[in-house]
Amino acid sequence: MIIAGKYSFNDSFVVIQNEYPDLLNEVKDIIAKVDSSKCKTKKSREKTMPGRLLYGPSALNRAFKKQFLRRNWKSQKLQCDYPTEFYEKSYSPKPLSDGAFREMDFVKDSLGVEVQFGKYAFMVYNVCAKMTIFHNFGFIQAGVEIVPVKSFADEMSTGVSYFEQFVWDLEKRGVSDIDIPVLIIGVDR
């Protein structure tokens, strides 16, 4: 795969190049080593493209995971202890299930990476909520979000979000004082 675009959210270019140059090179190498042609595995059942062979997000995620794990990146889980004191006194909830957690795809030396070939809401959640939470718990200082560019997303199921849309929204949203530096990398086949 190739890097087709980069967007520096909250000054991430400077932070990541200065603090994590070797890890950034690893991320670039990982992207280059992912063979997307092996991930064209999903046969469409959609009305707009019946029977068409598409890039499968699950296959792409597995290919990225294989490359990250080879370089000793680890997933990071964070146990969720959900509060119950905010329920109304008259409400009797079912017991919350044990084992709730949040997970970051890959972490190494305080740099977090999320690979997202899914719906738009997940991209926004990763950058504007999950990475901040993992920072607040001391797991990461900065992040990288790997997403498809539009031309690549067009070769996946409908509804997959893309780099250009995400960058536009982040530009219009602006940076909040709780946001951490996150490098958004747009990839193509």
Image: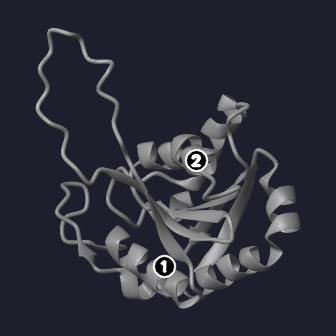
Residue type at the position of mark 1: Phe
Q: Is residue 116 above or below residue 25?
A: above
**Front residue (pair 7, 44):** 7
Say which mark, if any, is on residue 127.
2
Where in the figure is residue 86, as x and y percent of width and height?
33, 18
Residue that appears at 78% across and 54% down: 12
Mark 1 surroundings within 10 Å by alpha-carbon count, few (fewer than 14), some (14 through 19), many (20 or more): many
Amino acid type, residue under disc 2 in the picture: Val
Residue for badge 1: 64
In this rendering, position of residue 75 left or right of residue 111: left
Visible residue check, residue 184? no
Residue 90 x/y as whole percent: 14, 9
Q: Is residue 19 left or right of residue 6?
A: right
What number of labels is visible?
2
Image spot of residue 161 (x, y percent): 46, 51
On the image, the x and y values in percent for residue 96 come to 19, 39
Of the image marks 1 and 2, the number of the one nearer the N terminus: 1
Residue 58 seen from this side: yes
State left or right for residue 187 relative to residue 59: right
Instruction: Kindly indicate the quadrant of the structure image that contains residue 112.
Output: bottom right
